[in-house]
Amino acid sequence: MDQIIDELLQSLSETINKPSTKALFQGKDYHEIPFNQSNFNPITPIKGKLAFVDGGNAEILSAVNFSLQFFRIYYCIYENNKLLKQDKKEFFALINSIPKNNKIFFQTKLFQSDLEIPLIQSTEVESLASVADLIRRAAEIEITKEINSEYVILDGNLKADAEFIRELLKNKTLYALSKTNELYTDSGNSLTVELSTLSPFDSWQYTNLVKISSKMHNADIVITKLHPLSKYIFKLETPKDTDLNIIPVLASNSTDPVFLGYPYGLVQADKHARVSNQEKEYFKVKLLTSSKNKEKLSQYLNTINAHNILDSIL
């Protein structure tokens, strides 16, 4: 094992010792800007009002041609780090495949929600699970209509993975913070590790990283360390050409030792939006035991559940 760790450290040192000049993004719509020390700015936390949104979902029943999903979308509003309001929306979505003009489309019907999801061609997504991801994102954006706060932060990013998501994002001032990222420099190093090394400040924001010209990703990207004692650095996406007054307020909300340097509101949003395995199994049992067509339905479920049988044997 020691040999493996030594080899790993050696490979990392080779990357670290190469000079980096800029971030590295994939795609012609991303125009990287060379690193410049003047793009670092320190953060002085200030209190304020923030809203946080996250969503969770679980697949209850599925086959090759349908997926029944349960969704929970949650938001909370904090003012001066005190919980002001919280709410959630829960609904089911039935996604099934339909033929149209010799092509396969995915059709979505929602239960207990007024959100409308258009037909999605199967070539536009990887799987039924990808459609569920789009539904969750659409519901997260939709719930922001109910939120009274200057700053509304989503989990993840502001990239629209479908045209209808782009339409939902139009004329909305939303922010997004990623828990994780896979950003690199042109030397192959981790971007956040590289910037942490270059930063002259204990808590900081780095701007002017990249110019994005994609109509599907109408955002600016900031890298930030929100607490001087935190070991974590995050990617924050903001509306284009907006001020960054949100960052000191986020820093003020990122002091909880549960996840030092990460906004506590997003910790809470993640916690309350999650759908547990226990809930998933409850819905599954309830649906199957109440169905008069269990045997007919099981023929479809058996098309993809062979792995579950093997797992239970092993």
Image (spheres, rainbow, N blue to C red):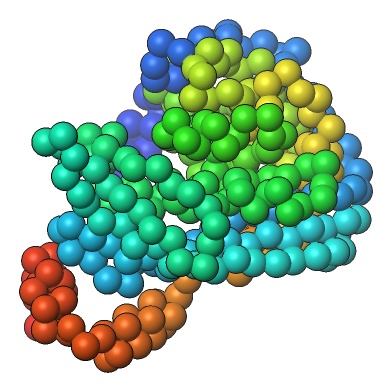
Q: Position of residue 74 (x, y in %)?
A: 63, 62
Q: Is residue 56 left or right of residue 69?
A: right
Q: How many marks?
A: 0
Q: Nearer the viewer, residue 268 or 275?
A: 275
Quarter location, residue 96: bottom left
Q: Is residue 170 above or below residue 50?
A: above
Quarter location, residue 10: top left
Q: Residue at x 73, y 29 (%)?
A: 205
Q: Is residue 254 above or below residue 267?
A: above
Q: Position of residue 217 (x, y in %)?
A: 52, 25
Quarter location, residue 273: bottom right
Q: Is residue 228 left or right of residue 123?
A: right
Q: Residue at x 25, y 86 (%)?
A: 291
Q: Residue at x 82, y 47 (%)?
A: 149
**Residue 240 seen from this side:** yes
Q: Is residue 264 above or below residue 275?
A: above
Q: Position of residue 140 (x, y in %)?
A: 58, 51
Q: Is residue 109 left or right of residue 224?
A: left
Q: Quadrant of the C terminus?
A: bottom left
**Residue 19 seen from this side:** no
Q: Is residue 244 left or right of residue 159?
A: right
Furthest toward the front, the residue is 101
Q: Position of residue 100 (x, y in %)?
A: 19, 40
Q: Nearer the viewer, residue 13 or 302?
A: 302
Q: Residue at x 59, y 56 (%)?
A: 54
